[in-house]
Amino acid sequence: MDTEKLIRDVVVNVMKRLQSPEVPQKSDSGQANKQAKTSNRKIVCGVSVRHVHLCAQHLEILFGKGYQLTKLKDLYNPGFAAKETVTVVGPKLNAIQNVRILGPLRDQSQVELAKTDCVILGIDAPVKPSGKLEGSSTAVIVGPKGVVHLENGVIRANRHIHMSVPDAQHFGIEDNMEVDVRVPGPKGLTFNNVQVRVGQDFKTELHVDTDDGNAADIVNGSLVEIVDASCVAPIEAQKADSQQIPPEIPDGSYAGEITEANVLKSINNGLEKNGAPTRAPDPDSGKKTVITADDLDQYQDSGIKLGPHVILTPLARDEAKERGIKIY
Ligand SMILES: [Zn+2]
């Protein structure tokens, strides 16, 4: 019976854990000892914002012959953020601007996005370890001097830990092992399937994308903990029967990280009711955005950008002035 086997496996694993020196046993006396043993599995987080790695050939197409990247900042692990950025365009013809290039150059160009970026661009990029580009997605990269149609190389990077050799020895972890990572706090959760890469020149650091980072409320420098969840049987991804699937309500908005009110308004104006993108908003179409005094909270920080299809009611205008909301 599968169930019996499952229970047996769980019991065996729990017994193993209890016997392991890494896990403080019930009989361990003193809270201090317990804390010392758990706190040394804490590691630091780096949240990777969408970025691009380029090969030499693509750098020249995008920026011109003989171009060299300018270093903006060293990363915590080997590599640097370049001063230069590009625009990434997907099949919906939406674009994400100011996508940072990370150096040094690589053999193959690679675009790393979060799921939210993929939704905006209309790209169904797979979750892959960096550099493993078989079956990855396509996008167009636009630079100041040219355009690259990247046939292959758009991924959502898998969760991974760069780990120094001494830390790997200390934790008893080998290169390419997968671990679980627990995040504390009100949005705390456990990340599964975190690949560990051990390297001579690595500093120990968890890398997640902005969607994972935002979901768990972590930022660069947050401390998280490697946990051993091997006693929990892995589960397969499944989808419910059709009658159990909650309906999707297409309200024409983009979920995710775009919270700037002016940007959301302009995106929504360019969408049909069913969420499908249309051409740029047509000022003569009669579709106008009316901002009333009730809407002002959303514009407190961003200010209100007036345009041919954005109307501000007189009351809203007066109140915006009173509240010091910029109108431009
Ligand atoms: Zn990384």
Image: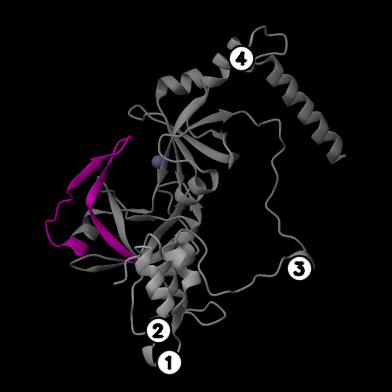
In the picture of the structure, the residue carrying the numbered disc 4 is 34
Residue 230 horizontal side relative to residue 67, left or right: right
Identity, as a three-letter code, of the amino acid under mark 1: Ser
In the picture, the disc for residue 281 is 2
First along the sequence among labels 2 and 3: 3
Query: Which quadrant would the C terminus be assigned to in this image?
Result: bottom left
In this rendering, is residue 180 above or below 145? above
Real-space Cα separation, disc 3 to disc 4, in angstroms: 47 Å
Question: Label 4: few (<14), some or many (≥20) within 10 Å?
Answer: some
| Front label number (2 vs 4) | 2
Residue shown at 53%/75% (left/top)?
252
Identity, as a three-letter code, of the amino acid under mark 2: Pro
First along the sequence among labels 1 and 4: 4
Real-space Cα separation, disc 2 to disc 3, in angstroms: 36 Å
In the picture, the disc for residue 242 is 3
Q: Which region is colored magenta? A: 61-90
Q: Tell me if residue 292 is in the magenta stretch.
A: no
Residue 206 figure quarter: top left
Label 2 beta carbon less than 8 Å to ligand 1: no
For the question of whether residue 120 can be seen, the reply is: yes
In the picture of the structure, the residue carrying the numbered disc 1 is 285
Please provide percent x and percent y for residue 209.
45, 48
Circles 1 and 2, Cβ within 8 Å, touching? The answer is yes
Q: Secondary structure at mark 4?
A: helix
Q: Secondary structure at mark 1?
A: helix
Q: Tell me if residue 85 is in the magenta stretch.
A: yes
Please provide percent x and percent y for residue 246.
72, 66
Please provide percent x and percent y for residue 12.
76, 24
First along the sequence among labels 3 and 4: 4
Query: Which quadrant would the N terminus be assigned to in this image?
Result: top right
Residue shown at 26%/57% (left/top)?
85
Identity, as a three-letter code, of the amino acid under mark 3: Ser
